Amino acid sequence: MHNRLHFLNVSMSALQRLMRLALAGLLVALLSACALPITAKVTTFNAWPADAAGSSFSFSAGDPARSELERATYENYVGVELQRRGLKLAPPGQAGRFIVDVATVGATRDKKVLEPVYQNQLIFVPPYRYGTGDVFPGYWAPDQFGSRYIGDREVVRTVQVSRLKVKLIDSKAGTPNPRAVFESTAVYEGDIEDLPDTVPYLVSAVFDGFPGQNGRVRVVKFDPQTGAIRR
C-alpha cells in the first residue's frame, strides 16, 4: 500500500509539472500577442520647395465633421511636427505661407481573416509494473509541448479604420493659384480603438522622414508600450 501511495504521488507531481508547463506556454503566447506593434500605412506625395525653412504656416477652416476642440487638438499635433521641421506658426488671424488642411475619418468594417487554431492534446501515459509487483496505473496528462497548431479557420472580425490626411498648400507658389506641395495619408486598421487614440500615431507616421520620397507607400510601426517608432 505504501508503494502504491508513493507511485500515486509521483504521478500527481508529474501531472502538475506538465500542467504548469502548458500554462506557462499559454501565458507566453498571450504576452506575445499583446506586444504586437501598432501599424500605420502611409502614402505621401510632395513637391517640397527648397526655400521652405523658416516659413510660416496656418490652418485652413478645418474639418467640419469634427468639433472645434477635437479639430484644434489634431491640428496641434500637426503644428508641433511642422515646427520641429523648421516652420513657424503664423500669428493669430494671419495666413501663413503654407495653408495646412487636416482631415480625419474614423469607422469600423468587417474583415475576413485567417485565425490559427490550436488544440490542447492529452497524452496517455501507459500503465506499467514495478519489480515489486505493484502496477502503476496509466493516466492522461497535458502535452508537455503545450498547444499544437492544427491549421487555420476563416473568421469575420470587426476592425477599426482610422484615417488621417495632411495637405500643405504653398500660397507663394503658382500665384494667383496656390498649389499643393505636400499631401500624405496615414491609415490604421486593427483592433477596436477610438479615433482620438490613434491620431497621435498617424501624425507621427505622416511626418516620419518628412517630406519623404514622392509617391512612396510605406509602413510605419510603433512600439505599443512606449509609442516610439520601431526601426
Image (cartoon, grey):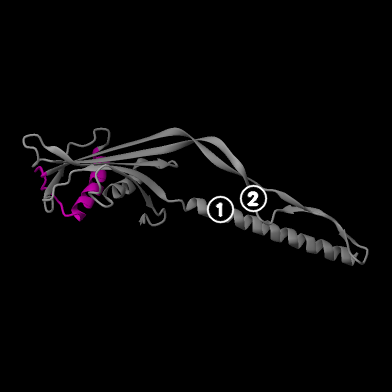
Element at label 2:
loop
Q: Quadrant of the N terminus?
A: bottom right
The kind of residue tagged 1 is Ala
Using the rendered image of the protein, determine whether residue 117 is visible from the camera's viewpoint: yes
Query: Residue 147 shows which numbered tag?
Result: 2
The kind of residue tagged 2 is Ser
Query: Residue 187 shows which numbered tag?
Result: none
Q: Position of residue 87 (x, y in %)?
A: 15, 52
Using the rendered image of the protein, determine whether residue 69 is visible from the camera's viewpoint: no
The answer to whether marks 2 and 1 mark residues whose Cβ atoms lie closer than 8 Å is yes
Residue at x-position 74% and y-position 54%: 141
Query: Which region shows up in magenta?
Result: 68-97
Q: Is residue 191 left or right of residue 202?
A: right
Q: Position of residue 28 (x, y in %)?
A: 56, 56
Residue at x-position 37% and y-position 54%: 227
Q: Disc 1 designates what residue?
A: 29
Q: Is residue 175 above or below residue 73?
A: above
Q: Is residue 96 magenta?
A: yes
